[in-house]
Amino acid sequence: MERNVGKGHRLAVFASGNGSNFEAIAAACADGRLDARVVLLVCDRPGAYVCERAARLGVETFAFRPKDYVSKEAYEQDIVRMLDERGVELVCLAGYMRILSRVMLDAYGGRIVNIHPSLLPAFKGAHAIRDAFEYGVKVYGVTVHYVNDELDGGKIIAQRAFDYTGADVQELEAMVHAVEHPLYVEAIAGLLAGRNR
């Protein structure tokens, strides 16, 4: 894959794990679907695979251990400084498993978006796919939304639904990811172009 070469808007991606949405965003920057480039990956788990993806794609990474800081506010102050120094215009949460404090929300409020694997407001929280599966719903989906101080509660930007009547949660998770990647890129493109406000 080409490296993260976009020259337009400056994005930061926050992730905690595998990083498939991070790579989808970086790939869209590289191939021109996004007039942007990812200037920083923020990761709260230094050993996470997303850090390897970032290294391969030439994206600068700030990987930190929250326990090394006295508080969430302290490490978010460091993050905000790095975002400001790099001229970040939009923060994209992509499997970042931490609730943001007022430090981030006050500095970048209205410029932080998240992708969530359910049709919000249904099935908020960290286990949305499994929760929906165990509940027995037949229509699943993905939501891109603004981040505010309510868990998965910010204004909805885009949603996409699909039917699933099978009995394999791993198959369902793969279907969710197949929807997430293009939807997030499309939503980010709309935001950068001034749509989806």
Image (cartoon, rainbow, N blue to C red):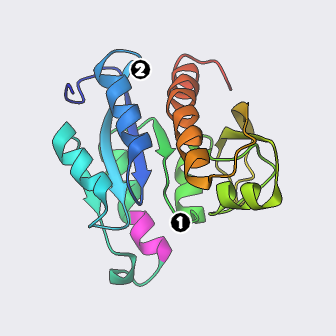
Give me the C-alpha separation between circle 2 and circle 1: 26 Å
Question: What element does badge 2 sit on?
Answer: loop
Q: Residue at x 18, y 47 (%)?
A: 55
Magenta stretch: helix, strand or loop mostly:
helix
**Residue at numbered disc 2:** 34
Identify the mark nearer the N-term, 2 or 1. 2
- Rendered position, 11 above or below 71: above
Q: Residue at x 58, y 65 (%)?
A: 99
Q: Residue at x 35, y 38 (%)?
A: 23
Q: In which quarter of the image is the N terminus?
A: top left
Measuring from the top left, give residue 155's x and y in whole percent: 75, 41
Callout 1 amino acid:
Arg
Q: Does the magenta stretch include residue 93?
A: no
- Rendered position, 15 above or below 21: below
Measuring from the top left, give residue 72's x and y in whole percent: 48, 74
**Residue at numbered disc 1:** 98
Question: What element does badge 1 sit on?
Answer: loop
Answer with the quarter of the image where residue 141 lies. top right
In terms of depth relative to the viewer, which is nearer, 69 or 18?
18
Q: How crowded is mark 1: few (under 14 residues within 10 Å), some or many (20 or more)?
A: few
In terms of depth relative to the viewer, which is nearer, 79 or 50?
50
- Rendered position, 112 above or below 79: above
Q: In which quarter of the image is the C terminus?
A: top right
Callout 2 amino acid:
Leu
Q: Which residue is drawn at 33% across and 49% down?
A: 41
In terms of depth relative to the viewer, which is nearer, 131 or 22?
131
Q: Give the range drawn in magenta.
A: 72-77
Measuring from the top left, give residue 76's x and y in whole percent: 44, 65
Answer with the quarter of the image where residue 18 lies. bottom left
